[in-house]
Amino acid sequence: MNVKKIAVFASGSGTNAQNIIRYFSGSRDIKVDSLWSNKPDAYALTRAAALGIDTFVFSRKQFYETSEVIDKLNERGIDLIVLAGFLWLVPENLIDTFTIINIHPALLPNYGGKGMYGMKVHRSVVENKEAETGISIHFVNRVYDDGEVIFQAKCPVLSNDSPEDVAQKVHQLEYKYFPTVIEQLLLEKIK
């Protein structure tokens, strides 16, 4: 069986990226091939490099106005792109070429869309006194957080929870489920 290759895209600290890399480090079937970032100072790059993963940084121009990123991903034989805290809207040509999934720190369609990420989501959940929140793993389409949902997991939001408490609970769900959903998607071909 051919080894399935993942390219992880991240803009931030990279805890999810690191978790995914570690999860697949012993796999014979799936390999994290590379980590890509739009921010040269993203800590995700440091985490990936420390784990022996090739890293690439690209500019807005390269991403939106050229085929450089797509060409390099094709050269590397990428089977799946995983967005793990990547904040730019993915261009159409990339969506048309690759299967791309994203993780969102809320139960979509709630608290999704442009500008809704990280602590902004958790603050909104607490301010609106939601009883639960969670994660959504979804296919990426041409609209922020709008693609078909593949998987959701929930956690309670207690009346005295701070946004930081909620973030902690949501991170635990991300670490637990994101790698296993990726694995199912690649090995069992969830469609």
Image (spheres, rainbow, N blue to C red):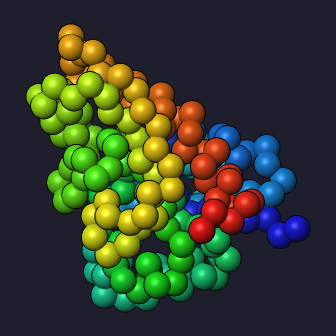
Residue 151, image x, y percentages: 50, 49
User: In the picture provided, is 162 more to the left or to the right than 38?
Assistant: left
Q: Residue at x 16, y 25 (%)?
A: 129
- In the displayed structure, 68 sits above or below 8; it is below
Query: Could you say which quadrant of the image residue 144 lies in?
Result: bottom left
- In the displayed structure, 145 sits above or below 50; it is below
Q: Is residue 113 visible?
A: yes
- In the displayed structure, 180 sits above or below 64; it is above
Q: Residue at x 64, y 44 (%)?
A: 180
Residue 106, image x, y percentages: 32, 41
- Spot the residue most to the front: 131
Give the tally of numbered discs: 0
Query: Could you say which quadrant of the image residue 163 lies in?
Result: top left
Residue 127, image x, y percentages: 11, 28
Residue 133, image x, y percentages: 32, 33
Q: Quadrant of the C terminus?
A: bottom right
Q: Quadrant of the N terminus?
A: bottom right
Front-most of residues 110 and 119: 110
Q: Residue at x 56, y 39 (%)?
A: 177
Q: Is residue 45 visible?
A: no
